[in-house]
Amino acid sequence: MSEEQNGPSGKPAIRTLAMPGDANPNGDIFGGWVMSQMDIAGGVTAAWRAQGRVATVGVEAMSFLKPVSVGDVVCVYTDIVREGTTSMAIMVELWVLRQSGLNREKVTEGVFTFVAIDDNGKKRPLPPVPDSSLSLS
């Protein structure tokens, strides 16, 4: 885990609101929901880079630094940190905007690995890097 900096690294991928249906009885959002939002954000970035279907094949070293509460705005940022022939590793950071004010806090980060797949679910090579003018941000 990196030290918390002034702000997120990477580009914004998704933003959503933590809702009561995603919480435990104490009002904290389930860790599995947090991970799923990170996987969705990483998948958005990976699919853009792969110009097609991708599958998650691994997640490296995640630890939860702070809880997410009902009403927090969840913001997920991504950055492609490694590429291979068919796969890529994406650093995913999850930050929250607390409902109680404008405080932005880092909740967790992790490296998610995705592989490009064809219509039959088989690995395929990554295409050339897309034109940066067509980026997600």
Image (cartoon, rainbow, N blue to C red):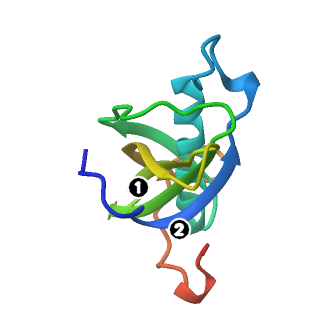
Residue situated in front as seen by the camera: 14 or 5: 5
Q: Is residue 119 visible?
A: no
- Crowding at dot 1, Cα within 10 Å, few <14 / some 14-19 / many 20+, comes out as many
The answer to whether residue 113 is above or below residue 60 is: below
* Residue occupying image coordinates x 69% and y 48%: 16
Q: Position of residue 77 (x, y in %)?
A: 50, 58
The answer to whether residue 80 is above or below residue 4 is: below
Q: Are marks 1 and 2 in contact (CB under 8 Å)?
A: no
Distance from Cα at disc 1 to Cα at disc 2: 11 Å
Question: Mark 2 belongs to which amino acid?
Answer: Arg
* Residue occupying image coordinates x 47% and y 59%: 78
Give the total number of marks visible in the rendering.
2
Q: Position of residue 104 (x, y in %)?
A: 49, 53
Q: Position of residue 83 (x, y in %)?
A: 34, 63
Question: Mark 1 belongs to which amino acid?
Answer: Ile
* Residue occupying image coordinates x 69% and y 38%: 71
Residue situated in front as seen by the camera: 91 or 107: 107
Q: Which residue is mark 1?
A: 90
Q: Is residue 99 visible?
A: yes
Q: Secondary structure at mark 1?
A: strand
Give the position of the N terminus as an image quadrant.
top left
Label at residue 49 = 2
